[in-house]
Image: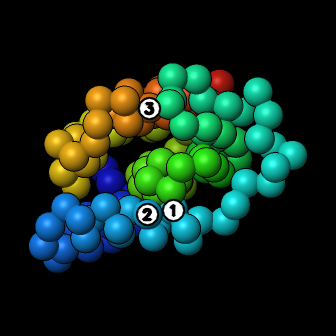
Amino acid sequence: MATPAFEDIAETFDFLDDWEERYRHVIELGKAMPPLDPAFQVPATKVDGCASQVWILPRIEGDRFDFQGESDALIVRGLIAVLHALYSGVKTGEVQAIDAQAALARLGLDEHLSAQRSNGVRAMVQRIRQLAADAG
């Protein structure tokens, strides 16, 4: 059930030999994301439970879920980009069915993130699911 964008990331990860290259790729994904307008970096869009500052702004078009995200940490911004690839364009009613933990495990991210970062990713996934549920 992965999106084509997430499949592209997974295929790239398959070609990268070590975690350092994968880590750099995640950071590059984050750098390539359009920035979230500072006007939307407010308490209402802030994700609690992340060590870094993280904001997620939902964008719903018809029955499709999308979001913009921002973080003050490069790796976290990259993780937002990975989650964006996983969820963007999915029907709002199907967001809950996506197993983000399994998808991130497929990339090996589950093994290479600190406990603090893993907790932050779980908080972001929980927020994304809540935003999609509220929109549905």
Are the residues tagged 1 and 3 within 8 Å (C-beta)? no
Q: Would you place residue 91 above or below residue 3 in this image?
A: above
Amino acid under disc 3: Gly
Task: Give above or below for 101 relative to 6.
Answer: above
Query: Above or below — where is 24 with respect to 132?
Result: below
Q: Earlier in the sequence, mark 1 or mark 3?
A: 1
Q: Which numbered tag is attached to residue 27?
A: 2
Instruction: Check disc 2 and report its element: helix, strand or loop.
Output: helix
- Dividing the image into 4 quarters, which one contains the C terminus? top right
Numbered circle sitting on residue 30: 1
Mark identifier at residue 120: 3
SS class of the residue under badge 3? helix
| Front residue (pair 58, 47) | 47
In the image, residue 25 sits, relative to residue 81, either above or below, namely: below
Q: How many marks?
A: 3
Q: Is residue 22 left or right of residue 108?
A: right
The image quarter containing residue 96 is: top left
| Amino acid under disc 2 | Ile
| Proximity of marks 2 and 1: CB atoms separated by less than 8 Å | yes
Q: Amino acid at mark 1?
A: Gly
The Cα atoms of the two marked residues, 2 and 3, are separated by: 16 Å
Where is residue 34? Give x, y as percent. Answer: 66, 65
Residue at figure coordinates x 76%, y 27% from the top left: 43
131 left or right of 123 in image = right
Question: Is 61 in front, or is 41?
Answer: 41
